[in-house]
Amino acid sequence: MLQQQVALDHLNTLALPCVADYYWPVTNAAEIETALAWYRQQQLPLLVLGGGSNVILPAHFPGLVIHMQNQGFVVEGDQVRAQAGQNWHQLVAACCQQGRYGLENLALIPGSVGAAPIQNIGAYGVELKDIFLSLKCIRIDSGEWETLNLQDCQFTYRESVFKNPASPRRLISEVSLKLSREPKLTLAYPGLQQQLAEQGLEPAAASPQQVFNAVCSLRQSKLPDPAELANVGSFFKNPVIDAAQHRILKQRYPDLVSYPAGADFKLAAGWLIDKAGWKGERRGPVGVHNKQALVLVNHGGASSAQLMQLAGAIEADIREKFGLSLEREPRLIDAEVGRA
């Protein structure tokens, strides 16, 4: 049902103040179609909101916010079909408990299922594309329903067709994943190996449930709970550089944290920010987390402008010190068009 002048402070994990002129929670396909039909009759910006864990909202959104509240999932053989409003971590936990494996490394990632393909979420060596099968979505401009496969989604590192401004805007309603009844563990990430070892487990002998538990412990030790300290998890992407640039940086900084990425190397953005002296930095109500420099936090009462000022200062400093450009992970919502 359409509502007006709705505060979204509690619907984004950064707890940024935002008032939407129009707000429409939807729980099924019919409600999605009705909300979009109303939207197409208006000349308004549109924002599709899930768990609010990957957005930076403006103070005022002069348009329609469609809030995905369709819940639930169905396991059919090795496949799971989940509604877009389903909490992601709860899905991961349930699949592991039901003997459907492949999602363990993606435990405790905040947000909803529908947001996962947009960002091609990933952690500890696994990305959504690795277990993705297809998704159902509706074109916002026409109301036409579509099914997109892996190739259609054009997944790359934290990118997808849904973030391409040249592609038609779509609203994702459900996602299908291809899992396995046999454990196929991904344990190459050093931090995960260390976490398993600290729990007295040999990585080669670990079960999927033990990997799930280790990932949860690892994230909880480094990342603040948004319910206790407002944040969106990783604020910056890990930069990818070529071998020549990596060699130069490694000579300058022997302790540089990096990982092979094909012929290139992926750098740990958190290490760069920490090395530049930003960990624990606080500027008014915003700051850099004192345990994980990749996380920017709202200590209370912050605005999106204050958060972006801090992010901009960090980006400029990393560019000056390392000659590298950092890219944001969360989407900065443009109040005029409703798109990042």
Image (cartoon, rainbow, N blue to C red):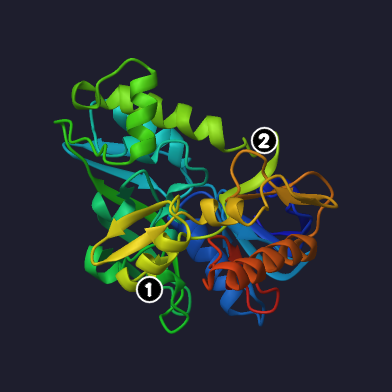
Asked if 112 appears above or below 39 in the picture, the reply is above
For disc 1, the marked residue is 144
Which mark is first along the chain, 1 or 2?
1
Residue 231 spot, x, y in % from top left:
65, 47
Q: Is residue 282 visible?
A: yes
Q: In terms of depth relative to the viewer, which is nearer, 164 or 273? A: 273
Asked if 288 appears above or below 332 in the picture, the reply is above
Horizontal arrangement in the rendering, residue 294 relative to residue 63 (left or right): left
Spot the residue most to the top: 200
Disc ID at residue 331: none
Horizontal arrangement in the rendering, residue 230 relative to residue 110 (left or right): right
Crowding at dot 1, Cα within 10 Å, few <14 / some 14-19 / many 20+, comes out as: few
Question: Please, what secondary structure does the residue beneath circle 1 have?
Answer: loop
Residue 39 spot, x, y in % from top left:
60, 73
Q: Amino acid at mark 2?
A: Ala
Asked if 288 appears above or below 214 in the picture, the reply is below
Q: In terms of depth relative to the viewer, which is nearer, 225 or 266? A: 266
Q: In terms of depth relative to the viewer, which is nearer, 292 or 319? A: 319
Question: Please, what secondary structure does the residue beneath circle 2 have?
Answer: loop
Count the marks: 2
Crowding at dot 2, Cα within 10 Å, few <14 / some 14-19 / many 20+, comes out as: few
Q: Amino acid at mark 1?
A: Glu
Asked if 274 appears above or below 246 in the picture, the reply is above
For disc 2, the marked residue is 227
